[in-house]
Amino acid sequence: MTITIIYISLSGNTESFVKRLSSYLKTWHQIDTKLINIKELDHTTFPVTEPFVAMLPTYLEGGNGVDNGDVEILTTPLGDFIAAHDNYKSCYGIVGSGNRNFNHQFCLTAKQYAKRFGFPVLDEFELRGTSSDIERIAGKIIAAQEAFDVD
Ligand SMILES: Cc1cc2nc3c(=O)[nH]c(=O)nc-3n(C[C@H](O)[C@H](O)[C@H](O)COP(=O)(O)O)c2cc1C
């Protein structure tokens, strides 16, 4: 089994999580990962036909996540990539990340993408994530990919 992870990371937290997750999957589940960092693509897109999971930190300007507007900044290239070539059809779920100091806006963009594209939020973690986040999220990704492959 190979797991494709498509992510964006601006300050390195999500990147750190993805790399630790990748080593965990290899060591404990003998699963290889293919990592695509959207930041390195410089706005280019290409079709992804194999199943993938997306990982998305939250960067919002303004708003409180409850009753007034919020604007996604910096992470929009991931949304554009998922929308391009109908790539969203190969995405079986998204994992959000953020900082709990943002209260109701914690991981809000992942929830917005789930609604926009019709895939589920598989889980969430804060900042670089803990080893228990890695263990739990690895389990959820494996289960979601297996279920998606059967469909
Ligand atoms: C300008 C800015 C806005 C942010 N807005 C949110 C937010 O609305 N909700 C949230 O959960 N985290 C928010 N964060 C925290 C980031 O999502 C968090 O630091 C994340 O780990 C960054 O991931 P990265 O290092 O992979 O880019 C914000 C951070 C910055 C710098």
Image: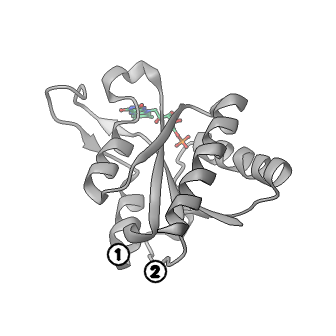
Q: Residues within 10 Å of mark 2 (few under 14, many from 20)?
A: few
Q: Where does the image place residue 109, in percent across and percent down from the top left?
A: 35, 43
Disc 1 under 8 Å from ligand 1? The reply is: no
Note whether 110 is above or below 107 in the view shown: below
Which residue was labeled with disc 1? 86
Q: Residues within 10 Å of mark 1 (few under 14, many from 20)?
A: some
Identify the residue shown where x is 57% and y is 31%.
127
Identify the residue shown where x is 38% and y is 23%.
102
Mark 2 or mark 1: name the one nearer the start of the chain: 2
Tell me how far mark 2 sits from mark 1, CA to CA: 8 Å
Q: Where does the image place residue 18, in percent across and percent down from the top left?
A: 65, 49
Identify the residue shown where x is 59% and y is 51%.
143
Q: Quadrant of ligand 1?
A: top left
Using the image as rendered, state which of residue 91 and residue 102 is in the foreground: 91
Q: Where does the image place residue 87, in percent across and percent down from the top left?
A: 41, 72
Is residue 12 visible in the rendered image? The answer is no
Pointers 2 and 1 in contact (CB under 8 A)? yes
Q: Residue furthest front?
A: 150
Q: Where does the image place residue 11, in percent across and percent down from the top left?
A: 56, 42
Dot 2 amino acid type: Pro
Using the image as rendered, state which of residue 139 and residue 114 is in the foreground: 139
Q: Is residue 85 left or right of residue 145?
A: left
Badge 1 marks a residue whose secondary structure is helix
- Colour theme: one colour
Locate the N terminus by quadrant.
bottom right
Marker disc for residue 47: 2
Identify the residue shown where x is 56% and y is 59%.
145
Note whether 74 is above or below 83 in the view shown: above
Badge 2 marks a residue whose secondary structure is loop
Dot 1 amino acid type: Asp
